[in-house]
Amino acid sequence: MDFSGVIPAIPGMWNGMLMTLQLMVMGIVGGIIIGTILALMRLSSNKLASRLAGAYVNYFRSIPLLLVITWFYLAVPFVLRWITGEDTPIGAFTSCVVAFMMFEAAYFCEIVRAGVQSISRGQMGAAQALGMTYGQMMRLIILPQAFRKMTPLLLQQSIILFQDTSLVYTVGLVDFLNSARSSGDIIGRSNEFLIVAGLVYFTISFAASRLVKFMQKRLAV
Amino acid sequence: MNYNWDWGVFFKSTGVGSETYLDWYITGLGWTIAIAVAAWIIALLLGSVLGVMRTVPNRIVSSIAAIYVEIFRNVPLLVQLFIWYFLVPDLLPENLQEWYKQDLNPTTSAFLSVVVCLGLFTAARVCEQVRTGIQALPVGQESAARAMGFKLPQIYWNVLLPQAYRIIIPPLTSEFLNVFKNSSVASLIGLMELLAQTKQTAEFSANLFEAFTLATLIYFTLNMSLMLLMRLVEKKVAVPGLISVGGK
């Protein structure tokens, strides 16, 4: 074991970490937006909308993320060509971001749905009594409270996503894990770099999950 | 639109021996199930031991289990897989190393690594479920068992665990399903399980959409049938008198 090669490789791994963080942030933001729309569809009284959202969630929750990433990587260029009629080259990064957004949306949908359902019915009644439309009620009354309640769960899911971004290895995107692996391979020290990568992932996830636990205690009513 | 849809592709010959693409999927599914079941057995056994350790009235024992859980939950599955596949064999004693790297065929060594990796990874999650199950029981159960003169192992074996397992069947089911989904990482170390076979089919036949649709359908069906099966089990063994009885 010789860890002396790690220091010079830090800039490369830092770039990898930036890629990991980008994937994570875009996956979270997109996932929460799509997930919230899905959750509202699931909760709506429109049968068709709620069935559609239910099917979406069931579908994405029963297949592996790795399958989604691989499929999107191969299929998104095809689909784009059908839509636009011309070759639109998109990189592995875009297809991975789309895959994360759509996959995580299914999980975020369930979190948001549980959050909305945990708000007491009286809130809805009061909003309606004030003459608010459905959109106003959701935007101004229900969702702000629901999001506050579900912050810990959303963060926990984000930590899982942070770890899952390492799966982009399969399409050759240079995220943190991949950058650590290639830096290690170059100098013949792949084992040492694997340990370093594991330690970094552990430190970040562990610190973040401690923070979430702390928040949970403070947010508890 | 220059894509040739061809749903009959699965019955065509792959050009490798006399196999059809469907044969590839069947082989792949076989590996997926083998990995998942083997890993689940490890996870259930080790997870139960750890879960008990976490609730035992002994600081040292319970913190060992707690540390285990934190380590295995906070390192990405793929990193853990690489550690078991690339790093751990290098740390083995000389003769074992030779056996693992040269005598074993590459599929078997990849299989062993994946099973150990997924088993230990999932054990951390099972541990948390078992702990939750034990802690969800009324304290009276333990006290009553103590009053009857049961020793600690007897309390766990005869009183706490039989009830705890029955409460945690729903979360255990979802962990079980996760093992199936997570087994797809095996494709990244060259094991030809379902996802790897799907990728290969897509590349050989150029029928990308059919190949992935079939894989999705297989995963979906597997998930749904296991879920229904576990729901039956759950009803069968429900603890009478608890609110949780009768599903959600």
Image: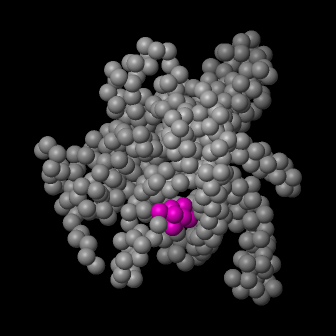
Q: Quadrant of the C terminus of chain A?
A: bottom right
Whether residue B192 is visible: yes
What percent of the width, then of the height, locates residue B173?
A: 52, 42
* Residue occupying the far bottom of the picture: A131
Quarter that holds the N terminus of chain A: top right
Instruction: State the residue at coordinates (78%, 63%).
Output: A148
As for residue B94 lying within the magenta part, the answer is no
Q: Is residue B165 in view from this perspective? A: no
Q: Position of residue B178 (x, y in %)?
A: 51, 44
Question: Which span of residues is magenta-colored?
Answer: A92-102
What residue do we see at 59% from left, 70% from top? A34
Q: Residue at x 49, y 76 (%)?
A: A48
- Snapshot quadrant of residue A192: top right
Depth check, front residue: A64 or A44? A64
Quadrant in which residue A122 is drawn? bottom right
Location of residue B243 by image quarter: top right
At 43% across and 37% down in the image, what residue appears?
B36
Most foreground residue, A190 or B107:
A190
Magenta residues, dominant SS class = helix
| Position in image of residue A26 (x %, y %) | 62, 65
Left of B54 or right of it: where is B21? left
Pinpoint residue A112: horizontal percent, then vertical percent: 66, 64
Q: How many circles with numbers are drawn on the protein?
A: 0
